[in-house]
Image (spheres, rainbow, N blue to C red):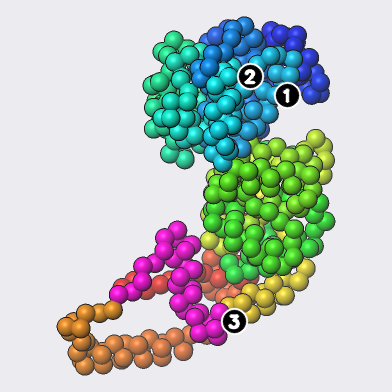
Amino acid sequence: MKFVDLGLSPEVLKAVEETGYENPTPIQEKAIPYVLMGRDVLGTAQTGTGKTASFTLPMIDILASGQAKARMPRSLILEPTRELAAQVADNFEVYGKYSKLSMALLIGGMSFADQDSKLDKGVDVLIATPGRLLDHVERGKVLLNGVKTLVIDEADRMMDMGFIPDVERIVSLLPPLRQTLFFSATMSKEMRKLADKFLLNPKEVAVSPPTSTAATVTQGLLLVQKAEKRPALRKLLKQEKVKNAFIFCNRKKDVDILLGSLTKHGFNAGALHGDMSQSHRMETLDKFKSGEIKLLVCSDVAARGIDVSSVSHVFNFDVPTHSEDYIHRIGRTGRAGQEGHAYTIVTKSETKYLDGIQKLVGRDLPIITLDGMEEVAEEAAAIAEREKNSGHGEKKGRRRKSEDSGSARPPRKSAPRDEKAPSKKNEASGSDAKAKDEKTRDKKPRRSHHQANDDQDTPVVGLGDNVPAFFKIPLRKTAQK
C-alpha cells in the first residue's frame, strides 16, 4: 500500500512525497483511514513505528475546514515530555506546509508571553505537556471547550511519570462530543481501563513491538567490576572509531555524574535530562545533531522521541531494566543500511536483566574483550585507594551510597548527656566478638582482583561459559544482625 491509497488530500500527499516517503508504516496504514472517518482510535504502538504521522497526517486534513478562535484551540495533543511535544510540532510544520494551519507549543522552559501571544490569535493545533497546559488554564489564557480532536500520546509514559491525574483533569474540561485518539506502547489492564474513560466505541489498531535488531549493528557485552565502569567506558571510547554516540544511563542523576567524568577526561560530551531548562535541552540536542557535541549522555525518558540519523555508536553504560528499551536504544544506530555499533557495559549485579534481552533479540550477545583491561583495573583500584587514604574514605563511601539510593542521609545526632553508657560487660563482649570475627576472617584466603575460586563458582544469569573468572566470584553475603 502507498500513501496515495489512504485517502489523504493532495496537499498532504505532496508534503509527504517531498520527505521521500512512499509507503506507510503498519500503524499508519491501520490508523489513518479510521482517523479520517472521525472514529475514536485505541492504538498500541511504540516510538519509532511512525506513530506520530499516523495522527498528524489525517488531523491536517480534518482541520483544513474551519476557523480558530482566540484562546480556543480546535485540537489538542498531549505529550509526556518536551522533546516529544517538540517533535510532534516539527511533524505538523513538515506535513502541513501546504495547509494554512496555526499551531502553538506549550511546554516548560519557554516564555509564557510568547505562548500567550499565539493563543490570543487562535490556534488550530495545540501541542502541550500536561503541567504547562494546566498553568495556562489556571491563568485563564486558554479555553478547552472548543476542542474537537484530542490525542493522548505515550499514555503508558504518562502513567509512569505520574501525569494521569493532570490528564483526567484536562479531559474533564473538554466537550464530551469529540474525537479521541489514544496511543500507548503497551496495553495493560490499567491502561485499557484508563482508555475506557476517554474513548467511545474505539477502533483498536496495534502493531507488534520490534523484537529484532538490525543486522548492520555489531553488538557486544563488556563485563567489568562496578568500580571499573567509567574507566572501561573511556577505554572503549578511545578504542572504537566513534563518530558520534548515545550513552545511556538508567537514572537521571547518573547522567550528570558520567558527564562530569567524561568532560574531566577531555571528551566532547553533553547531557540530556529532565532537570535542564527547555532552551538548554534544545541547544544541546542541536549541537549533537550538528556534530558540535560528539557524545550525548542521556536517560531513556529524556531521549525518547529523539530522531538523529547517522549515529555510529550506542553505549549502554547501564543495562536497561526493560528488555524493550534495549531494542529502542540500539535502534538509534545502524539505520538505513549503515554500519552501527552497540556495546553494553555489564556488572555482575546487572546480569539479571540480560536473560530477557537475549530472549527478545533471539540470540546470545557476544562477550567482547577490551585492550588494556589491566590498566582499567589498576585505575579503578587507584581511585579506591585514594579515597581510602584521603581520611574520608568510609564517610565518603557511606555518603555516596546514600546518594545512589536517591535519598540524602541525615546528619547523625549526638547522644543525649543523660543516656546510659554501655556497660563494661557489653564492651568486653563486643571486643571479644570483634576479635573472634577478625581471627576467623584472617583464616580465609584472600582473592586477587580477577582470581576465581573454582569450588565456589556460581552461574551468571544470561551469560554462557565465556565469562571472565572474576565475574564468577560469588558476592559476599552480609551477616544479618
Residue occupied by mark 3: 386
**Image vertical order of residue 404 relative to residue 81, above or below:** below
Q: Which residues are magenta?
A: 387-413
Tell me the kind of residue under disc 2: Ser
Q: Is residue 455 magenta?
A: no
Taking the image as drawn, is residue 156 in sight?
Answer: no
Q: Secondary structure at mark 3?
A: helix
Horizontal arrangement in the rendering, residue 27 relative to residue 182 (left or right): right
Determine whether the residue tagged by mark 1 lies in a helix, strand or loop.
helix
Amino acid type of the residue that numbered disc 3 sits on in the rendered structure: Arg
Residue 267 lies, in percent from the top left, at 74, 61
Q: Quadrant of the C terminus?
A: bottom left
The percent position of residue 450, horizontal first and vertical second, equals 63, 75
The kind of residue tagged 1 is Val
Q: Is residue 456 left or right of residue 10?
A: left
Q: Which numbered marker is on residue 135?
A: none
SS assignment at label 2: loop
Residues packed near mark 2 inside 10 Å, few (<14), some (14 to 19) or many (20 plus): some
The magenta stretch spans residue 396: yes
Q: Residues within 10 Å of mark 3 (few under 14, many from 20)?
A: few
Left or right placement of residue 298 versus residue 23 in this view: left
Residue at image mark 1: 94
- Of 72 and 418, nearer the camera is 72
Residue bearing the label numbered 2: 102
Nearest the viewer among 389 and 82 is 82
The relative height of residue 270 versus residue 393 in the rendered view (above or below) is above
Residue nearer the viewer, 134 or 178: 134
**Figure quadrant of the N terminus:** top right
* Above or below for 261 versus 435: above
Q: How crowded is the residue under tag 1: few (<14 C-alpha within 10 Å), some, or many (20+)?
A: some
Instruction: Please name the residue shown 26% across and 90% down the image.
Output: 427
